[in-house]
Image (cartoon, rainbow, N blue to C red):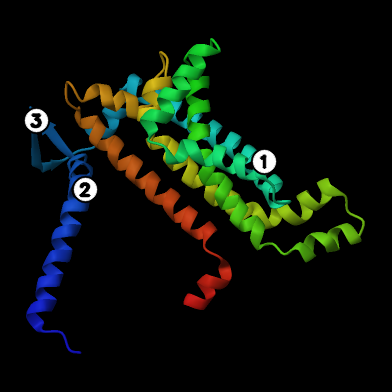
Amino acid sequence: MRRHPLATIALSLVTVLVFILLYGPIFIPIVTSFFTVKYGTVDWNQLSLDAYRKLTENENILEAVENTFIVGLSAVALSLILGTIIALHVNSGRSRSRALLQLTVFLPFLMPPMITGLSLLIFFAQVDIPRSMITIVIGHTVFVLALVYRTILVRLQSIGASMLEASYDLGANAPQTFLYVLLPNLKSAMIGAGVLAFALSFDETLITILVTGTQNTLPIRLWGMMRLGFTPDINALVAIILALTTLLVLIAARTLIPKDFAGAET
């Protein structure tokens, strides 16, 4: 069935409009970061990197970025260790305890972040744990664990049992089977899960607000700056974060898509 030319034009206009509405607010601060801003007005006739220079001098933002990376990398490391252990346990058999364990892992991720953060806040208060970077790491780990666990479990289930049986038949013990058989096959899934978990941790705000102490992550710092308005160096920060996020997405897509599927597409 041939489409009417007017319908094609209308669909094209709608596509362009949606693209502008979705990505326009993102690209505006990126473009303005390369121009001089005076008294809230952008001087489009003068290219400048002053925003990036001022960003390197903003100690509060740099400290928040550093804290964000520390929390994100710590949460990724913990979630990879716990997610792998839980996935290996669940994949080894079926029982009610394993079903309950999966529910425990998925529940914080499925609940609204405000509820998850409030639950963690009450727990830390009951066990007398002061709010600090450690509580933020725990909160982020609990939140991203479900994503990491599920990604690793799916890859683990795709590995045939015959491969493990062959390893044991050849005399390998459990640690050797894990190191030389399972781990190489799980490597790409672990990398992809770690990248996605870091992206979620980097952006998490609601849970962090409830479990943070005196040290703030970047989303909390930006949240506090909303009252007074953002300085031009924040535009430079947005550009850098967008570039980093794009890179992480490309890495995740590269590692999560099976090679045989990519070859079939080409």
Q: How far apart are marks 2 and 3 (CA)?
A: 18 Å
Q: What residue type is labelled 2?
A: Phe
Q: Which amino acid does label 1 sit on?
A: Ser
| Quarter of the view holding residue 171 | bottom right
User: Residue 63's x, y, as percent?
Assistant: 40, 22
Q: What element carries label 3?
A: loop
Q: Which of marks 2 and 1 is nearer the N terminus?
A: 2
Instruction: Classify 10 Å Cα crowding around label 2: few (below 14), some (14-19), many (20 and above).
Output: some
Residue with the mark numbered 1: 97
User: Residue 249's x, y, as percent?
Assistant: 42, 52
Residue with the mark numbered 2: 27
Residue 9 horizontal side relative to residue 224, left or right = left
Q: Which amino acid does label 3 sit on?
A: Gly
Up/down of 186 relative to 220, above or below: below
Q: Can residue 194 be seen in this view?
A: no
Up/down of 258 relative to 234, above or below: below
Q: Which residue lies furthest to the right in this view?
A: 171
Q: What element carries label 1?
A: helix
Q: Distance between the residues labelled 2 and 1?
A: 49 Å
Instruction: Classify 10 Å Cα crowding around label 3: few (below 14), some (14-19), many (20 and above).
Output: few
Residue located 47% across and 58% down the image: 253
Foreground pick, 254 / 93: 93
User: Residue 241's x, y, as percent?
Assistant: 35, 40
Q: Which of marks 2 and 3 is nearer the N terminus?
A: 2
